[in-house]
Image (cartoon, grey):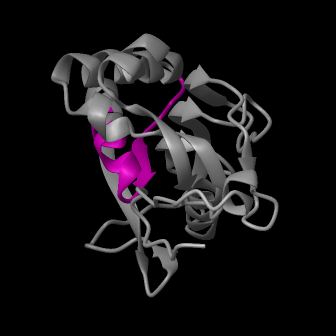
């Protein structure tokens, strides 16, 4: 999997502000991998196989990064796929999407660093009275330290160092920062 990221130019080195607000010298641009149908299918097959037979009725993803992965995992599982998105900074379920009480819902994300967006989606699932079937992702940057569900599966799990803006050595060195994530990031 790491070779696929490298070969597609999706593993970037530099100074990045992550969606979580943390800074890192490494960035996973999943969209560069997932734009290739053969990679999208293969990556999502690993996630779908893990959750096959576990009663998943719906797949939900946080917008924007998780939508492509969630849709393909849902297609492979043969279940409804929806997404949550931010409205005025708050994660919400819109566009006529709904979750029913006791519905078994799987959360799918592209990259997990702190798990903030996924945690917000899990809160939406619980507030609807639905049941969390698990969490799946393409990349877990925490190497398993961030565990968001009893059944949490990632295709690629590795430790990628990140820093608060205040402790970031790249900021201290004056290295210009890039914020390539899907959520609007102010530069620090």
Q: Residue at x 52, y 34 (%)?
A: 137
Residue 1 visible in the current orientation: no
Q: Nearer the viewer, residue 8 or 86?
A: 8
Q: Position of residue 69 (x, y in %)?
A: 35, 37
In which quarter of the view is residue 172 placed? bottom right
145 to 172, vertically: above or below = above
Q: Residue at x 49, y 19 (%)?
A: 53
Q: Which residues are magenta?
A: 54-72
Q: Nearer the viewer, residue 21 or 187?
A: 187
Q: Is residue 39 left or right of residue 5?
A: left
Q: Nearer the viewer, residue 88 or 151?
A: 88
In which quarter of the view is residue 180 placed? bottom left
Q: Is residue 69 magenta?
A: yes
Q: Is residue 55 magenta?
A: yes
Q: Position of residue 98 (x, y in %)?
A: 38, 66
The residue furthest bottom is: 88
Q: Residue at x 49, y 71 (%)?
A: 185
């Amino acid at each position: 999997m790491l070779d696929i990221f490298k070969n597609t130019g999706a593993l970037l080195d530099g100074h990045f502000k992550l969606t979580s607000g943390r800074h890192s010298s490494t960035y996973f641009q999943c969209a560069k991998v997932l734009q290739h149908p053969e990679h999208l299918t293969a990556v999502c097959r690993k996630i779908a196989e893990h959750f096959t037979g576990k009663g998943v009725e719906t797949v939900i993803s946080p917008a924007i990064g998780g939508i492509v992965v969630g849709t393909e995992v849902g297609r492979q599982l043969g279940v409804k796929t929806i997404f949550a998105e931010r409205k005025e900074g708050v994660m919400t379920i819109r566009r006529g999407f709904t979750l029913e009480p006791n519905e078994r819902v799987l959360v799918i994300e592209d990259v997990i660093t702190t798990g903030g967006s996924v945690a917000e989606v899990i809160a939406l699932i619980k507030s609807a009275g639905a049941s969390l079937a698990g969490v799946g992702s393409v990349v877990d940057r925490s190497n398993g330290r961030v565990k968001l569900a009893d059944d949490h599966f990632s295709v690629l799990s590795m430790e990628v160092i990140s820093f608060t803006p205040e402790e970031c050595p790249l900021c201290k060195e004056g290295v210009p920062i890039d914020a390539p994530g899907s959520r609007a990031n102010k530069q620090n």
